[in-house]
Image (spheres, rainbow, N blue to C red):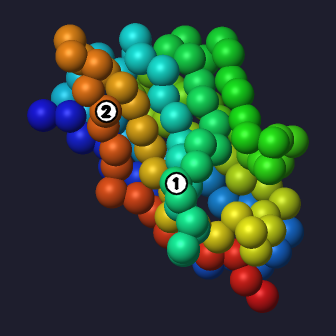
Amino acid sequence: QVQLVESGGGLVQPGGSLRLSCVASGFYFGIYSMSWYRQAPGKERELVADITDTGGITKYANSVKGRFTISRDNAKNTLYLQMNSLKPDDTAVYYCYTRAGTWRTDYWGQGTQVTVSS
């Protein structure tokens, strides 16, 4: 059974930092691309960052470029999102995502809340 479990969210002041983690299980983590998405209240879910299976290629939404870093540790089956210089507009529930398996099924974590506020 595929599971994606996020952690690391919380309340942080503008300009602060957080590191999100997503621990994966139930599939061969090291051969699939992974992504972070986020959804703010009243808005559609949006892609934040992508990373390829080996971590060699990363892509970012323009809104987070230069502030967020996506990375992965395939030995630990873990995906990360380092978020620096956080802004109130970064407030959202952050989700870990992959499309994996024989049938290329979409899998989502349960989400972790990030709130940026003074």
29 on left or right of 59 = left
| Disc assigned to residue 45 | 1
Q: Please, what secondary structure does the residue beneath circle 2 have?
A: strand
Taking the spot 67% from the left edge, 16% from the top edge, the residue there is 57
Residue located farthest toward the left when viewing the structure as drawn: 1
Task: Classify the position of the N terminus by image quarter.
Answer: top left
1 relative position to 90: left or right: left
Q: Nearer the viewer, residue 41 or 77?
A: 41
In the rendered view, tell whether residue 16 sits above or below residue 118: above
- Which quadrant, please, contains the C terminus? bottom right
Counting residues from the start of the chain, the first of labels 2 and 1 encountered is: 1
Q: Classify mark 1: residues with Cα within 10 Å, few (<14), some (14-19) or many (20+).
A: some
**Observer-nearest residue: 29 or 43?**
43
Q: In the rendered view, tell whether residue 33 sits above or below residue 44.
A: above
Residue type pointed to by label 1? Arg
Up-down relation of residue 51 to residue 14 (above or below): above
Disc 1 secondary structure class: loop
**Residue type indicated by callout 2:** Asp
**Label 2 to label 1: alpha-carbon separation:** 14 Å
Which residue appears at 41% of the width and 52% of the height?
A: 6
Please give the residue where the numbered disc 2 appears in the rendered image.
106
User: Is 26 placed left or right of 29 in the picture?
Assistant: left
Mark 2 crowd level (few <14, some 14–19, many ≥20, 10 Å Cα) = few
* Mark number displayed over residue 79: none
- Look at 46% across and 51% down and name the residue there: 95
Q: How many tags in the picture?
A: 2
